Image (cartoon, grey):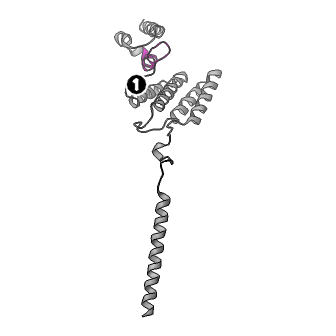
Amino acid sequence: MKQPQNQQNSFNRASNAIVLASVLVLSACSSTSSTPTITELPVHRIDQQCRNQAQSVQQSASDTANGAQFNYAAELYLRCIPHGAMLDWSEADKQDGMQMMALATLNFVKGGQVKKAKTTLADMRSRFHGRDLYLSDFTSFTDTLTALIEGPKLSVSELAALNISRTVRDEIERQQYWLSH
């Protein structure tokens, strides 16, 4: 009869140990109000180190007027922006993303990669759904790049509808005149 009681005591001790271990594990997992949760931590969507590298390459390209470096800087800018949905991006990250896509587009134009510039501009329009950047003279970045990329193909009315500077408009019109005469 002593043996079943010993088995009962062993079972009780084992179950008490399991309960105690469970309580300790669960209490260690509970969070307090002073510990930030993952959703409270700031999330940076743009790789700043990558951006700095792209800016350095762009500066070098400007200093040396090297088309290959402009193209490399453009590719770097695009790599700094994560792909996928931007629904949870902050306004600052969206602005940074737009600026880097704009810089990539400009660098492709400077590097002679007009098709890539056109593709990047279209991607920027689709990713940022009608948002635009404005230049210092309050003209539209996307309209200006459209004029530069599509210039000879634009009709007079299409060109007139674009929010571009008078200088760009005059140059496109001059180019269209000489291409047609």
| Left-right relation of 53 to 172 | right
Give x and y (percent) for residue 68: 59, 28
Check the picture and name the quadrant holding the N terminus. bottom left
Check if residue 136 falls in the magenta segment: yes
Give the residue at x 43% y 9%: 176
Q: Give the image location of residue 148, x and y in percent.
A: 46, 17
Question: Is residue 139 covered in magenta?
Answer: yes
- Total marks placed: 1
Residue in the picture at 39% in, 36% down: 87
User: From what the image shows, is residue 19 above or below residue 59?
Assistant: below
Q: Position of residue 164 (x, y in %)?
A: 44, 13
Q: Amino acid at mark 1?
A: Arg
Depicted 32 relative to depicted 87: above or below: below
On-image quarter of the C terminus: top left
Secondary element at tag 1: loop
In the image, taking residue 143 as reference, residue 56 lies left or right, namely right
Q: Is residue 86 above or below residue 21?
A: above
Q: Residue at x 44, y 86 (%)?
A: 7
* Direction bottom: furthest residue: 1
Please give the residue where the numbered disc 1 appears in the rendered image. 131
